[in-house]
Image: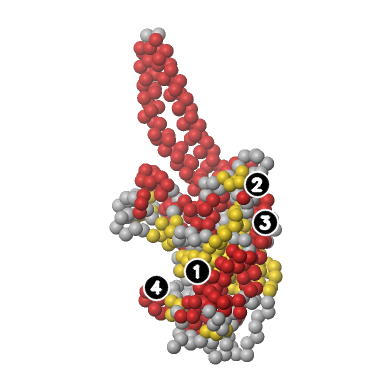
Amino acid sequence: MFDIKSIRDNPQAFDAARKRRGLEPLAATLLALDDERRAKIAKLQAAQERRNAASKEIGLAMREKDSAKAESLKAEVAKIKEDFPAWEAEERAAVEALNKALSEIPNSPLSDVPEGRDEHDNVEVLKWGAPRKFEFAPKEHFDIGEGLGLMDFETAAKISGARFVVLKGRLARLERALAQFMLDAHTDQHGYTEVDPPLLVRDDAMFGTAQLPKFFEDQFLTEAGGLQKQRFESRTTNAWQGAVAFLDQHGEAAFREAAARGIEAVDFNLNEDWSRRWLIPTAEVPLSNLVRESILDESKLPLRYTAGTYCFRAEAGAAGRDTRGMIRQHQFFKVELVSITTPEQALEEHERMTGCAEKILQALELPYRKVLLCTGDMGFASQKTYDLEVWLPGQNQYREISSCSVCGDFQARRMNARFRPADGKGPRFVATLNGSGVAVGRALVAVLENYQNADGTVTVPQVLRPYMGGIERIERAG
C-alpha cells in the first residue's frame, strides 16, 4: 500500500512506475481524493473550533446580560451539534474512499525488472540440470499416478468436486516425505524457524498481505453454520470489495455506513466469537502477519519463517487451464518461506531466499530454470520476483514450482509492521519477502515425471529415501 504523501511529493515518479506495469496514470485522481479528505477534515476541525468558541461567547454574553446574543449563539451551537454527525460521516467516507483507492494499487517494480506484457517477456537467468533422455515416451503425472492405482481424481470429484485429488499408499507418503524433507532443509540448513500457523484468518490478515480486496474472487470464505449469517447484495463489485476489508474490525455500524454507499445487508448479525474466516491461499498470510502492529528491534532482523501447510485457492481466474491433474487445484500443500527485514537488506535477502528454494530442487536432482518476471507478469504486491520452473518431461516444458518475491514496505504499511533502527531514529516500516520453498504438490508431479520408469514404476529420489522408510521404488498398489 502506498503512502499518499510520497505520491504527492513525486506524482510523476508514481505514474512512471504505473506505466511500466502497463497501467494508466493515477496520481491526479488520488491527489484529488486526498484533497477531498483534507477538506472534510478541515471542515470538521473548523466546526469544532467554532463550537468551542461560540460556547465561550455564550458565557460572555450571559455575563453581559445580552440574552439575544446568547440565544443566537446557542442556536448556532445547536445547529453545529446537529450537523456534526453528517460531517463526520462525510469525513469517514472521504478517508475510506482514499484508502480503498490506495489499497487497489499494485506495488511499483524495481528499476532492474524488465518491462513486458506477460510471461513471454520474462527473462531466463539460468538453467540447472539437464533433462533426462528417456528411452520411452514419458507420461504425464496423472497417467503415472492412476496407473499405480494411487492417484484418484474420480473419487475426489465425488467428495469435493473438480480440482481435488485423493492420494493413497506410497504416493501419499511421498508427498509427506517431500514436505518433511523441505522443512528439515529450511530449518536445519537454511536458518528458518518453523511455524505451525492457523489456516483460517481474519479480514485484516488477508488485507495485510494484499489478498484483499484485489483477489477477493480467488479466496475461500468460511462461515460458522447457524451462528452467523452474512449475506450481502452488492450494487457494484467495487463496493462489495471495499466492505470486505473492514467489516470484522468495525462491526455492524461500519457495515451500515457501507450500506449508504452501495451495499445492502440481509440478515447481518455480527458475532465476535463466530465471525467469518478465510482459508489461507498460502502460509505467506499468517507468517507475514506474525509481525503485524509491531515495532521490532533492528538487531532482531532478519526474521525468517517457514511453514508447511495446506493452501486453498478458488482458481477463479484459471477457468479451462490445467483442468486435469495436480498442477492447479483448490487444495494443495506448500512449504512457504517468509522473511522480515530492513529495506536495505531486502534485495540481498531476496537472492538468499531464492537460493534456498533452488537447493531443494538441486537436492531432488530436478532440472529447473530461474526466470526474472517482467512488469506485466509479476504479482500485485511484488517489487521483483524470481520464478523457479521445474522441467516436466510428460508435458515437455518447464512449469512454475516456486515464486520468490520482495515486496519492500508495501505489505508492512497495510500491517503497520515497523522496526526501531539501531541509530535511535524513529520507527520505519519493515520490508517483507515471501517465496515457495517449494510447492509440494508440484514437486510430487515433478518427481513422478522425472523419475518414472518404462514399467510404470517410479524411482524414489535418493534424498527422500530416509523419509520413505528406505523404499526405493513405488510400484502398483495391490
- Does residue 24 appear in this view? no
First along the sequence among labels 4 and 1:
4
The mark lying in front, picked from 2 and 4, is 4
The residue identified by callout 4 is 161
> Quarter of the image holding residue 8?
top right
Q: Are marks 3 and 2 in contact (CB under 8 Å)?
A: no
The Cα atoms of the two marked residues, 3 and 4, are separated by: 42 Å
- Mark 3 lies on a secondary structure that is helix
- Is residue 209 or residue 355 the one in the foreground? 355
Q: Amino acid at mark 2?
A: Gln
The mark nearer the N terminus, 3 or 1, is 1
Q: Which of these two is toward me, 381 or 356?
A: 356
Estimate the x, y position of residue 295 in percent, counting from the top left. Answer: 57, 45
Residue at image coords 34%, 50%: 271
- Residue 273 lies, in percent from the top left, at 36, 51
User: Marks 1 and 2: in contact by CB < 8 Å?
Assistant: no
Image position of 406 with respect to 94: above or below: below
**For the residues bearing labels 4 and 1, Cβ distance under 8 angstroms:** no
Give the residue drawn at x 58%, y 67%. Answer: 184
Q: Which residue is mark 1?
A: 333
The dot on residue 12 is: 2
User: Which of the labelled discs sits on residue 347, or is there none?
Assistant: 3
Distance, label 4 to label 1, CA atoms, is 18 Å
Mark 1 secondary-structure assignment: strand
